[in-house]
Amino acid sequence: MLVRIAIVILAVIGLHAVGWLRPVESGLRSVLNLGLAGAYRAASFVAGGRETATGPSNEENGQNREAERVELDLLRAENVELRALLSFSSSTHYALIGADVIGRGVDPLGTTIIINQGRRSGLRLNNPVVAGQGRLIGTVARVEETAAVVRLINDSRSGNLRP
């Protein structure tokens, strides 16, 4: 009896090695995969995979909460800064013109910057340039129609203002 079983096993191994059992193996694999996929989904649902069926997992919720907390902290800091700027602008007697830095001068020391406001916005030569809560950072050194060059206070020529 053992000899017959051994012969059958050797025959199956030989047919597999030659490739003659490939269609049968493929069909069995397809049937097993269908059954295993259903069993996996059922086991995963029973074992706590309900989060994936009904919504994000606890880990994803934690990551989302952390990202939202960081964003909220950044927005709070920005709000404090904007309130301080608003307080400064209401306490000064000067007309303030908001501008963004759009470039730096070619000087390797970086003592000039280019801003996106100019003559059209009301800027004039030697106007003071402030940042934040009114900290002087420089003066307008050259004015064009829609841009201006600001000489920063760390420039050695910063004290040489010409009318």
Image (cartoon, helix red, strand yellow):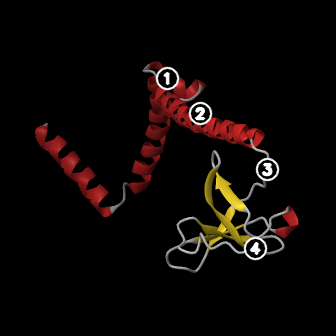
Which residue does the numbered mark 3 point to in the structure image?
A: 94
Which dot, 3 or 4, sits closer to the camera?
A: 4
Helix, strand or loop under label 1: helix
Dot 2 amino acid type: Leu
The residue lying toward the viewer, choosing from 16 and 150, is 150
Residue extending farthest to the left is: 2
Helix, strand or loop under label 4: loop
Dot 1 amino acid type: Phe
Which residue does the numbered mark 1 point to in the structure image?
A: 45
Which residue does the numbered mark 2 point to in the structure image?
A: 72
Left or right of 93: which side holds 23? left
> Looking at the image, which residue is at 45% across and 21% down?
48
> Looking at the image, which residue is at 75% across and 54% down?
98
Which dot, 4 or 2, sits closer to the camera?
A: 4
Which dot, 2 or 3, sits closer to the camera?
A: 3
User: What's the distance in space between the residues labelled 3 and 4, CA to CA?
Assistant: 19 Å
Mark closer to the chain start, 1 or 4: 1
Helix, strand or loop under label 2: helix
The residue lying toward the viewer, choosing from 93 and 102, is 93
Which dot, 1 or 2, sits closer to the camera?
A: 2
Mark closer to the chain start, 3 or 4: 3
In the rendered image, residue 1, in percent from the top left (x then y), is placed at 13, 36
Which dot, 1 or 3, sits closer to the camera?
A: 3
Residue extending farthest to the top is: 46
